[in-house]
Every structure is written in structure tokens, then in C-alpha cells.
Amino acid sequence: MSLTVVGSIAFDAVKTPSGVRERMLGGAATHFALGASFFDDIRVVGPVGDDFDEDAWRVLRTRGTITDDVEHVPGGKTFFWKGEYHDNLNSRDTIETDLNVFEGFEPKLSDAARACHVLFLANIQPDLQRGVREQCTGARFVAMDSMDLWIKIARESLEATIRGVDCLILNDEELELLTGKPTVLAAAQEILGWGPTAVVAKLGKYGAALYTAEGVFAVPAYPLETVVDPTGAGDSFAGGFVGYVAAQRDEDITHDLLSTAMAYGTAVASFNVEAFGTERVEQLTAGEIAERVVDLQRMTSFSAEPVALRG
Ligand code: AMP
């Protein structure tokens, strides 16, 4: 049994107030796998080109991530993305997206990848996401991400894909854009009506919120003095969140279980943003994650003695 992720494997060029990197390993599936590899056996599905070097393979295989389903396209170039962050780090401009081997990508899953018990559909064209989802018939939990582009140009397909998963993970603005609702709560309720049993709203530097039929659970972002590079924060959050769920094989996937998973996602993402690209999460240890989860537990719980209120 394992956790399968399908999505981009990339080289990224990034400029943030802390500095510049011209070319480093990135991609949604990469950041997800690095975070999720603390919890389960991870299989990555995605294409790479001839330029995908030994060092990139080494990083992708951190903590035993299985790369048998990574498709090497002979003569091709790996997906390339270039982004620049604004001073507040909560917004960025995409300067360049070279799809390269990602153009015409058709995910091919081995029997082992299809037999996953948990599946994460990272941000790719929603028809492709749905195709993969339909192949993984035995998965007990399927989560997905998407982006504004697909909401704008492939809304119907995206909605059909969302209807087939258990959990949608999107940022707050995307949730509102997708549903036309004016608040994240209203948007989440609308999507819970489509079929998923959970919606996670990523709120950038403010953290993340979980919505299920049982209620709402919010986690702040882990407080950091310095953020170096937010690239991949959403995907490493998803890696910690979905990874935690995958590790709870015999448990029912309840609101409480997903709330704990939110803390793991938040902890993993907080390390991701402390350095460029994959640099920090490559070196991360299980003990460091556990410490931040304990801190988050302290931050999100309080004892409330009832007081007599006026009025
Ligand atoms: P995040 O910061 O969580 O949105 O993830 C950023 C990662 O997603 C980067 O490492 C990029 O390589 C990758 N990425 C950027 N644009 C796309 C896209 N259109 N499709 C798939 N992956 C992308």
C-alpha cells in the first residue's frame, strides 16, 4: 500500500526579497512528495526531460520516494517555472511557464501506483486528474488541488473532477472564484454539496481552515520571523496533510483526524518556506516536525472558564 501523487516535476527560477535562484528542483509533485515521505511510501507520477540530472533524482528520492512512475521523455526538457514574489511574500507574479514535457503529458500509472490507498492529484489539467482518479478505484482518500487557470478555462471539467474526490484543497480566492460565493465558508459549503466530505482553504500567511459537515477547524501559519521562499508551501502543506491521513490506515477519516492532519501540513509547510526550493525539507527530521506540531497544538487550544457576560 502506498500514497500516489500525480503532478508537476519542475525546475524553478525564483526571486524573493531574500535572494534569487536561477534553477532549482521544484514542481508540485516534488514538494508534495518531500513532505509526505515522512508518513508513507510515496509514488510520484509525472514527466521529466533529458535535463533531469542525478542531483534532481537524488532529491526526488529523499526518504525513499519511489520514482518508478516518473516518465523520462527522451529528447524533452523538464517543465520550467519562473516566479517573482512581492515584498509581502503573499503574492507573486509568474514570469515564465515552459510546459516542455508537460505538454501532451498523459499520466501512465503502473499497477502499484494504481493500487494506492491514498491519492493526491496535484495541480494539473482537470481531465487528467479525473483520468487518474478513475484508475485508482481502491483509494480510501483522494485529495486534489487546482488553480485559477483551470477555474477560468475548464470550469466544467474541474467541477466534474471535484465531484469525484474526498477533499478539495484550494486557496481562499480560488474557492470564491470557483463557486461565485462571497465568503470562504459559503464557498466551502457549496463544494461540500458537490460530493467531497472535506474542503481545505489555504489562507497563505494566515494559515489554513478545514470545513466538513461537522464544522470548521482553523490553524494559524506557524509563526516565523523570516520567510525566505514560499514556493511550494501549498504542496508541502498538502504533503503533510495527506501524508498524515495515509499513515492512519485503520482509522476512520473523521473531522478530528483531519484537524490533526492540518497541524502536520502546517508544520511541514513552515519548514518549506525557511529556505529556497527543497533545501530545508530535504534536511528536515521527524523530530523537528513533531516539535512544531506540539507548538501548534498549544496555539490552537485554550481553556475557557465561562464568565458572566452583560446583556
Ligand atoms: P505553490 O507555491 O504551492 O503554488 O507551488 C509552486 C510549484 O508549482 C512550483 O515548484 C512550480 O514548479 C509548480 N507550478 C507552477 N505553475 C504550475 C502549473 N501551471 N502547473 C503545475 N505546476 C506548476
Image (cartoon, helix red, strand yellow):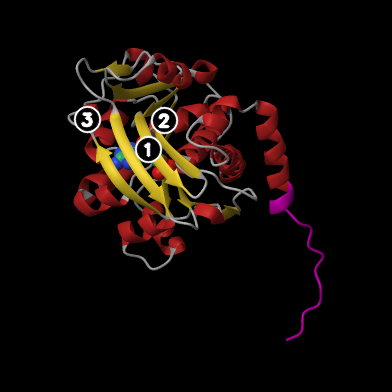
Residue type pointed to by label 3: Asn
- In the rendered image, which residue does mark 3 sit on? 100
Magenta span: chief secondary structure: loop
Image quarter for residue 103?
top left
Image quarter for residue 13?
top left
Q: Which mark is residue 24?
A: 2
- Secondary structure, mark 2, is strand
Q: Earlier in the sequence, mark 1 or mark 3?
A: 1
Q: Which span is picked out in magenta?
A: 298-311
Q: Are marks 3 and 2 in contact (CB under 8 Å)?
A: no
Residue type pointed to by label 2: Met
Q: Are marks 1 and 2 in contact (CB under 8 Å)?
A: yes
Q: Is residue 99 left or right of residue 304?
A: left
Please, which residue is most extreme toward the left here? 104
Q: CA distance from mark 1 to mark 2?
A: 7 Å
Tell me which residue sits at (30%, 34%) in the image: 80
Which of these two is toward me, 298 or 229?
229
Residue type pointed to by label 1: Ala
Question: Is disc 2 surrounded by few (<14), some (14 to 19) or many (20+) residues within 10 Å?
Answer: some
Q: Is mark 2 within 8 Å of ligand 1?
A: no
Tell me which residue sits at (68%, 46%) in the image: 296
Q: Where is residue 151? Give x, y as percent.
A: 27, 52
Q: Is residue 305 above or below residue 12?
A: below
- In the rendered image, which residue does mark 1 sit on? 13
Tell me which residue sits at (43%, 57%) in the image: 172
Question: Is disc 1 surrounded by few (<14), some (14 to 19) or many (20+) residues within 10 Å?
Answer: many
Question: Is disc 3 surrounded by few (<14), some (14 to 19) or many (20+) residues within 10 Å?
Answer: some
Residue 306 on the magenta span? yes
Q: Quadrant of ligand 1?
A: top left
